[in-house]
C-alpha cells in the first residue's frame, strides 16, 4: 500500500493479494476519512514483482521511477466511495500513470525508467532502481550499486544520497511505507 497524497492510496493486486482484500482496505479507509480514492494496480501474477513498490516509486510530487517491463502491462482501477456506506464507485482507468497524475493533480508524471533485469543481463551488473526511499520531494536514498538508475535519477534532477548494502534489493523489498515523500507541501 502506497499513500501518494491528495487522499489517494495505491494498492498492488498481484500474486499475494486479492481484490476482496483491496475492497476491505478501501472500505476501512473511506469509513474513517483516511482516503478518498484507492487505485488498485492489477499486476501479473509473478513472484519477481509481486510488490508494487519494487516496480513503481514516488521520487517527487510529479516524478516517479518505473520498471517498464512490468508497469507497461498493469491495469488501474479506481475505487471511490459509492452512493451508500460500504459501496464503491469503480472506474477502469485509461492508464496507470494517467490515473496517478490525475490523483495528484498534475498534468503528467515525469518518469525515470529503472535498469532492471535487461540492464543486469546486458552489463552483468546489479541494478534494482526501485529500492529507493524518499526523504522529501526530490531527495531520495538508494543503494550505491544501483548505478544505472542513480545516474538516470540524477540526470532527471533528483538528489540521490547513496548508501552501502544491497540485501533488501536482492529480496525484492522496497521502501514500503516510505515510498512517497514525507513532506508534500511547503509549510
Image (tube, rainbow, N blue to C red):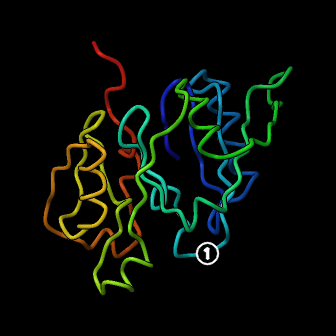
Q: Residue at x 40, y 31 (%)?
A: 61
Residue identifier under label 1? 46
Q: Nearer the viewer, residue 74 or 33?
A: 74
Tell me: residue 35, above or below residue 18.
Answer: above
Q: Residue at x 38, y 77 (%)?
A: 119
Q: Which quarter of the rendered picture does the C terminus lie within?
A: top left
Q: Is residue 177 left or right of residue 146?
A: right
Q: Nearer the viewer, residue 5 or 111?
A: 111
What x and y, as percent, mark residue 133? 30, 49
Q: How many neighbours does mark 1 have within 10 angstroms: few (below 14), some (14-19), or many (20 or more)?
A: few
Tell me: residue 54, above or below residue 65.
Answer: below
Q: Is residue 46 left or right of residue 139?
A: right
Residue at the extreme top: 187
What x and y, as percent, mark residue 163? 14, 60
What x and y, as percent, mark residue 176? 41, 52
What x and y, as percent, mark residue 141? 22, 51
Residue at the extreme front: 155
Secondary element under disc 1, as helix, strand or loop, is loop
Residue at the extreme right: 83
Tell me: residue 61, above or below residue 123.
Answer: above
Q: Is residue 127 left or right of residue 30?
A: left
- Number of callouts in the render? 1
Q: Answer with the quarter of the image where residue 69 lies.
A: bottom right
Q: Nearer the viewer, residue 25 or 142?
A: 142
Q: Residue at x 39, y 40 (%)?
A: 180
Amino acid at each position: 500500500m502506497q499513500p501518494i497524497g491528495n487522499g489517494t492510496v495505491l494498492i498492488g493486486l498481484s500474486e499475494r493479494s486479492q481484490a476482496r482484500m483491496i475492497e476491505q482496505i478501501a472500505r476501512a479507509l473511506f469509513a474513517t476519512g483516511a482516503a478518498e480514492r484507492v487505485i488498485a494496480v492489477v499486476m501479473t501474477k509473478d513472484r519477481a514483482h509481486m510488490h508494487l513498490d519494487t516496480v513503481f516509486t514516488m521520487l517527487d510530487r510529479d516524478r516517479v521511477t518505473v520498471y517498464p517491463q512490468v508497469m507497461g502491462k498493469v491495469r488501474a482501477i479506481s475505487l471511490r466511495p459509492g452512493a451508500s456506506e460500504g459501496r464503491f464507485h469503480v472506474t477502469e482507468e485509461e492508464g496507470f500513470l494517467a490515473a496517478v497524475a490525475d490523483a495528484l493533480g498534475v498534468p503528467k508524471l515525469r518518469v525515470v525508467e529503472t535498469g532492471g533485469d535487461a540492464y543486469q543481463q546486458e552489463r552483468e551488473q546489479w541494478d534494482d532502481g526501485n529500492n529507493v526511499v524518499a526523504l522529501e520531494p526530490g531527495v531520495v536514498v538508494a543503494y550505491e550499486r544501483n548505478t544505472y538508475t542513480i545516474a538516470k535519477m540524477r540526470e532527471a534532477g533528483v538528489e540521490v544520497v547513496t548508501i552501502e548494502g544491497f540485501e533488501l534489493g536482492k529480496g525484492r523489498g522496497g521502501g514500503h511505507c516510505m515510498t512517497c515523500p514525507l513532506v508534500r507541501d511547503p509549510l
